[in-house]
Image: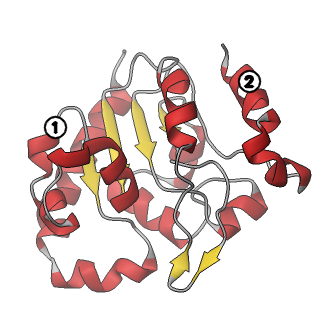
Amino acid sequence: MTVEEIKRAIEADPDNAAYTEKGWEPLFHVLPSATILVISQAPGRIAQSTKTYFNDASGDRLRDWMGVTRDQFYGSDRIAVMPLDFYYPGKGKSGDLPPRKGFADKWHEPLLALMPNVQLTMLVGQYAIKAYLGRSRQKTLTATVQNYQDYLPDYFPLVHPSPLNYGWQKRNPWFQEKVVPDLQQRVAKALKSDN
């Protein structure tokens, strides 16, 4: 299946009928030339309404961590984005609701098969880390991110770039001092790769 065929299948899936009826499109960006893959939780409210993934403060912070401009992030044929759910899940008590269970299980594998050149897979936030690292992750999100090298070269786990996590970043200065520079080097290398 092609990306477009998979997109149509997602829109036609009865599990997504409520979103399709609202006129919402599934938000993801998958292309065969991708060398960097961002696996995140789900689009936010602004992203869904503007039909642009990471089109918010979290996206600005993520791009800063990656060392890329907005134009590079959206215009490069090397950066793919594949959340655990392609639709905004709604508002919860302390932020957005988590991605729906089962969505990634159903749609990630056929999309991953279309990206044979990925060299760097970033797991952004606790939901993506749990889904992809499973029992191999540390007892806490902080410990997992601090020991990110244990998961390379397959995965690069990161805390979510949400403004809600600014306090976490202040309490953990090693993240900006050690993790971010390494991430930026790996992103730069993958962007320059000839596949």
Please name the residue that numbered disc 1 is placed on: 152
86 up-or-down from 174: above or below: above
Colouring scheme applied when the structure was drawn: secondary structure
* Residue under the point 62% across and 62% down: 55
Residue 166 location (% of width, % of height): 34, 82
Q: Is residue 82 left or right of residue 195?
A: right
* Residue under the point 90% across and 51% down: 21
- Sequence order check: which comes first, mark 1 or mark 2? 2
133 up-or-down from 191: above or below: below
The reply to whether callout 1 and callout 2 are in contact (CB within 8 Å) is no
* Residue under the point 33% across and 22% down: 193
Q: Amino acid at mark 2?
A: Glu
Residue 17 location (% of width, % of height): 82, 47
Q: Amino acid at mark 1?
A: Leu
Residue 38 location (% of width, % of height): 43, 44
Characterize the local packing of mark 2: few (<14), some (14-19) or many (20 or more) Cα atoms within 10 angstroms: few
Please name the residue that numbered disc 2 is placed on: 4
Give the position of the N terminus as an image quadrant: top right
What distance separates the C-alpha of mark 1 from that of mark 2? 31 Å
Q: From where the camera sits, is residue 67 visible?
A: no
Q: Nearer the viewer, residue 187 or 84?
A: 84
* Element at label 1: loop
Residue 185 location (% of width, % of height): 22, 43
80 up-or-down from 97: above or below: above
Characterize the local packing of mark 1: few (<14), some (14-19) or many (20 or more) Cα atoms within 10 angstroms: few
Q: How many marks?
A: 2
